[in-house]
Image (spheres, rainbow, N blue to C red):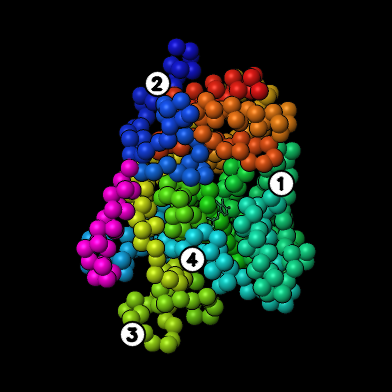
C-alpha cells in the first residue's frame, strides 16, 4: 500500500456519508469492473429507488387511469408538490418560491418573458463570456424577440486571470459601467467549463443597485453547493435535475421566483392552464388567475413519469443534507488537488479556483501540451475505467461527488491520470 492508499482508506473509514453510495447504481468500465464515475456534473447516476417510483406511476395509470389524477398514493394533480419542501431546502428558498416544471432552457425562456422587460435605454443583458451555448442562444433570441441586437445590447464579461477565472469585481465593474442601460443579469451559480462558483449575493446586490434584475442559471449549482436564493434576494433562477441531482436523463427541471414577485399582477407571463389557481382551474373560465408563487409559472400538466425519479434522488439529499455533503466535497477536493500536484506536477493545470468559496465538486483540468495530448490523455483515462468528460478545446472535467465517490476512487483516478499522461 502506498501512503495515498493508506490515507484514502483512513478517510473512507471515517466517512459518515459512505453508506449513501449503496443507494446508487454505478456503471461498469470497459473491463466489466465498476467504473470510477466522476461525471455526475453531466448526468448523475441512477438512485436505485428511482425504478420503484416510476413503476408506482405506471401501476397507478394501469389500475386507475383517469382517476389517477385524484386518487392513488400521489395524485397527479398535485404530484409536483411532493418536491416543494425538498427543493426549497436545496436552494435556500421559501416553499412558494420553487417549482419543478418543464426543462431548463424552456424555464429560462418563460422567466425571461416575465423578467426581461426592456424599455427605452434600459435594454441590455449581461452574461459571462464563454457561457453555456443554450443560455447565450436563449438570451440572444430574447433580444431579437424584443427587436434588439446582440451587438448593441448583449454584454459578455471576460475572465480577468490567466487561468480564465473571474473576480467578483469583474462582474460588479461591468454592472456599474452599464448602469441604467442594464436591464438584466443572467449568470451561472457555478460556471460549467471551469467549475468556478460565483458570488450570487454580491452580484445580485450590484444588479439591484443599478436597477437591473438578477437571474441565475443554477444547472451546476443545485445539489453541488449550498444555496441561499431567498436571502440573497435573487429575482429568479432556473436549473436542471439530471446533473448533480441525479433525477435521470431529461428529468423535469426547476425554477425559483422570489416571493416579492410571486403575487405581482403587473408581470406579464407566457401562461398556461396549469399555472391557474387550482381552486378554480377546472371551472374552465376564460380569465387567468395565477397560483401565487413559482407554481403560477407552470404552463402544462407535467410529465409525471419524468417527475417520478426526482422523489428518489431528493430523498437521498434530504437524508444527507447539503451541509454534510459540502463538507465531504471539500475534503474530496483537497485530497484530489494534493494528489494531482504530487503526481502530475506541471503537466496538469487546475483551472478551477482553489479557494473553497469559489469551487464545488468539479475540477477542470487542462493538460499542458495542447489539445491532441489532452484528448489522448482523456481517452486513455476512459479506457481504464475513469468516466469524466471532455470540453473543447482542452479541458478534462472530473467531479468527485460526495454522494458516491470514495477517497479510494479519487486516489485511483489520479493514479490513472498520471499514468495516462506518461503514456499519451
Ligand atoms: C446543462 C446546462 C444546460 C442544458 O440545458 P437543457 O435545457 O437542460 O438541455 C443549459 N445551461 C447550462 C448552464 C447548463 O449547465
Mark closer to the chain start, 1 or 4? 1
Q: Main secondary structure of the magenta part?
A: helix
Please state if 36 lies on the left or on the right of 204 as rendered.
left
Residue 351 coordinates in the image, percent (x, y): 65, 36
From the image, tell me which residue sits under label 2.
10
User: Would residue 225 be seen by someone viewing this image from the given angle?
Assistant: no
In this view, 235 is above or below 3: below
Image spot of residue 6 (x, y percent)? 43, 16
Q: Who's the residue at 33% across and 39% down the image?
A: 23
> What is the distance, in whole Å, between disc 4 and disc 2 at their CAs?
44 Å
In the rendered image, which residue does mark 4 sit on?
Answer: 257
- Callouts 4 and 3 close, C-beta under 8 Å: no
In the figure, residue 349 lies in which quadrant? top right
CA gap, disc 1 and disc 3: 53 Å
Q: Is mark 2 in CB contact (under 8 Å) with mark 3?
A: no
Q: Is residue 267 magenta?
A: no
Residue with the mark numbered 3: 283
Q: Are marks 4 and 2 in contact (CB under 8 Å)?
A: no
State yes or no: residue 52 in magenta: yes
For label 4, count other residues whose C-alpha is less than 10 Å away and answer few (under 14), some (14-19) or many (20+). Answer: many
Please state the total of marks drawn on the protein image: 4
Segment tinted magenta in the rendering: 48-70
At 31% from the left and 66% from the top, the residue drawn is: 76
Q: Please tell me in which quarter of the rendered image ligand 1 is found.
A: bottom right
* First along the sequence among labels 4 and 2: 2
- If the image is split into quadrants, where does the C terminus sit? top right
Amino acid at each position: 500500500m502506498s501512503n495515498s492508499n493508506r490515507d484514502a482508506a483512513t478517510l473512507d473509514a471515517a466517512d459518515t456519508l459512505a453508506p449513501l453510495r449503496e443507494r446508487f447504481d454505478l456503471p461498469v468500465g470497459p473491463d466489466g469492473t465498476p467504473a470510477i464515475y466522476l461525471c455526475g456534473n453531466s448526468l448523475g447516476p441512477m438512485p436505485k429507488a428511482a425504478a420503484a417510483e416510476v413503476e408506482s406511476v405506471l401501476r397507478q395509470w394501469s389500475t386507475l387511469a383517469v382517476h389517477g389524477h385524484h386518487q392513488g398514493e400521489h395524485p397527479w394533480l398535485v404530484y409536483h408538490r411532493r418536491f416543494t419542501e425538498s427543493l426549497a431546502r436545496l436552494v435556500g428558498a421559501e416553499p412558494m418560491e420553487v417549482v419543478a416544471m418543464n426543462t431548463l432552457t424552456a424555464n429560462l425562456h418563460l422567466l425571461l418573458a416575465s423578467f426581461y422587460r426592456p424599455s427605452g435605454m434600459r435594454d441590455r443583458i449581461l452574461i459571462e463570456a464563454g457561457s453555456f451555448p443554450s443560455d447565450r442562444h436563449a438570451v440572444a433570441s430574447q433580444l431579437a424577440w424584443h427587436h434588439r441586437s446582440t451587438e448593441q445590447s448583449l454584454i459578455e464579461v471576460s475572465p480577468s486571470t490567466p487561468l480564465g477565472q473571474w473576480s467578483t469585481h469583474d462582474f460588479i465593474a461591468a454592472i456599474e459601467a452599464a448602469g441604467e442601460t442594464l436591464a438584466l443579469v443572467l449568470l451561472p451559480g457555478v460556471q460549467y467549463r471551469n467549475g468556478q462558483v460565483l458570488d450570487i449575493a454580491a452580484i445580485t446586490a450590484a444588479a439591484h443597485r443599478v436597477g437591473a434584475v438578477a437571474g441565475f442559471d443554477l444547472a451546476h449549482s443545485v445539489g453541488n453547493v449550498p444555496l441561499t436564493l431567498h436571502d440573497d434576494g435573487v429575482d429568479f433562477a432556473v436549473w436542471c435535475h439530471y446533473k448533480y441531482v441525479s433525477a435521470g436523463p431529461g428529468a423535469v427541471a426547476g425554477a425559483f421566483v422570489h416571493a416579492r414577485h410571486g403575487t405581482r399582477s403587473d408581470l406579464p407571463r407566457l401562461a398556461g392552464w396549469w399555472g391557474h389557481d387550482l381552486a378554480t382551474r377546472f371551472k374552465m373560465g376564460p380569465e387567468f388567475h395565477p397560483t401565487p408563487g413559482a407554481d403560477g409559472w407552470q404552463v402544462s400538466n407535467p410529465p409525471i413519469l419524468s417527475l417520478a425519479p426526482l422523489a428518489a434522488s431528493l430523498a437521498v439529499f434530504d437524508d444527507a443534507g447539503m451541509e454534510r455533503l459540502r463538507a465531504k466535497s471539500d475534503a474530496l477536493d483537497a485530497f484530489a488537488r494534493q494528489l494531482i500536484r504530487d503526481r502530475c506536477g506541471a503537466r496538469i493545470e487546475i483551472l478551477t479556483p482553489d479557494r473553497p468559496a469559489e469551487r464545488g465538486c468539479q475540477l477542470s483540468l487542462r493538460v499542458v501540451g495542447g489539445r491532441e495530448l489532452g484528448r489522448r490523455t482523456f481517452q486513455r483515462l476512459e479506457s481504464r475505467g475513469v468516466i469524466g468528460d471532455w470540453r473543447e478545446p482542452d479541458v478534462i472535467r472530473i467531479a468527485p461527488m460526495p454522494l458516491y465517490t470514495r477517497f479510494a476512487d479519487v486516489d485511483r483516478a489520479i493514479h490513472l491520470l498520471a499514468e495516462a499522461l506518461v503514456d499519451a
